[in-house]
Image (cartoon, rainbow, N blue to C red):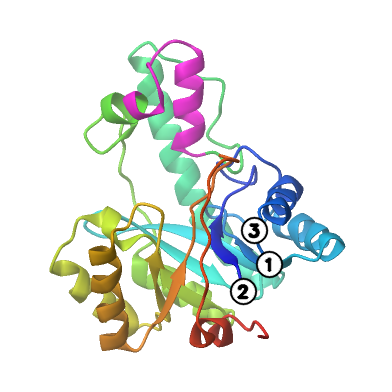
Amino acid sequence: MKADFHLHTTASDGSLTPSQVVEWAKRTGLEVIAITDHDSVSGLDEAIKRGKELGVKVIPGIEISSFSSCEIHVLGYNFDYKNPDFKQDLAKVQGMRKERNGAILKRLSEVGMPLSFTAEMDGIGRLHMAKEMVEKGYAKDVNDAFERYLGPKGKAYQEIKRTTPMDAVKLIKKYGGVASLAHPKKYLLDKKLDLLVGGLKAHGLDGIEVEYPRYTDYDKAEFRQIARKYGLVCTGGSDFHGDEDKDFQVNPDKSTLRALGIRY
């Protein structure tokens, strides 16, 4: 079964609409996908509807941004995203994101780089800001925008109160979902990664993202070892944001399919 459990749409910082992402998945031969927009579920209904029309299984998902010693993302799957209580809880997470966006936009304006976004806009993230900075000539490319302004060492970087990784896991579990630690290599935690995973497991973590485009065989082996140690399922995904030439898919094992409620 060909799958991709980490995809973004225009509901957060992707460049394709939910329907277009499903259509892209169909063209590339994917049978099962998860839409995992940042702190947002607003694209799920559209994607699921289009998936039924095209014969692509769409799993409800999300990627929750959190912060501990660094920014950490937690993927959620198959939770009750239509529950009014979930929407209220998610609104608190989104409020923190908007507060941070406002601080970044204010700082960019102070250094002579005003953007068209406002803090109250839904689904806005640093990638949107970076792209507009390139369009306006403030940065050479997206990487330059992050390195000089939006990344942790950048002039406009702002860190405010954020959801913790433990709270992100608990939020997903509260509404019946499956929680998986996204792209663990990005956090550069080395031996501390084991401690992070162990702590999150105690709060209900179900999986870890083992398959990812830039992972070496050594990386995958390391993360599989951690998964075995803590009894976690191995998830995987491309972290797709609209690059239609991206050729990546995973072949999940039976334990992952069972955990995500997929018949095989």
Kindly identify which numbered label has been placed on residue 41. Answer: 3
- What quarter of the picture does the C terminus occupy? bottom right
Q: Secondary structure at mark 1?
A: loop
Image location (x, y in percent) of residue 134 = 45, 18
Residue assigned mark 2 = 1
Tag 2 and tag 1, C-beta contact below 8 Å: yes
* Label 2 – label 1 distance at C-alpha: 7 Å
Q: Secondary structure at mark 3?
A: loop
Q: Residue at x 40, y 13 (%)?
A: 138
Are there few (<14), some (14-19), or many (20+) residues within 10 Å of tag 1? some
Relative to 186, is 148 above or below? above
> Which amino acid type corresponds to the residue marked 2 in the rendered image?
Met
> Which amino acid type corresponds to the residue marked 3 in the rendered image?
Val
Q: Is residue 177 in the magenta section?
A: no
Kindly identify which numbered label has been placed on residue 31. Answer: 1
Query: Which is more N-terminal, label 3 or label 2?
Result: 2
Q: Nearer the viewer, residue 28 or 22?
A: 28
* Label 1 – label 3 distance at C-alpha: 21 Å
Image location (x, y in percent) of residue 93 = 49, 57
User: Would you say 191 lies left or right of 186 here?
Assistant: left
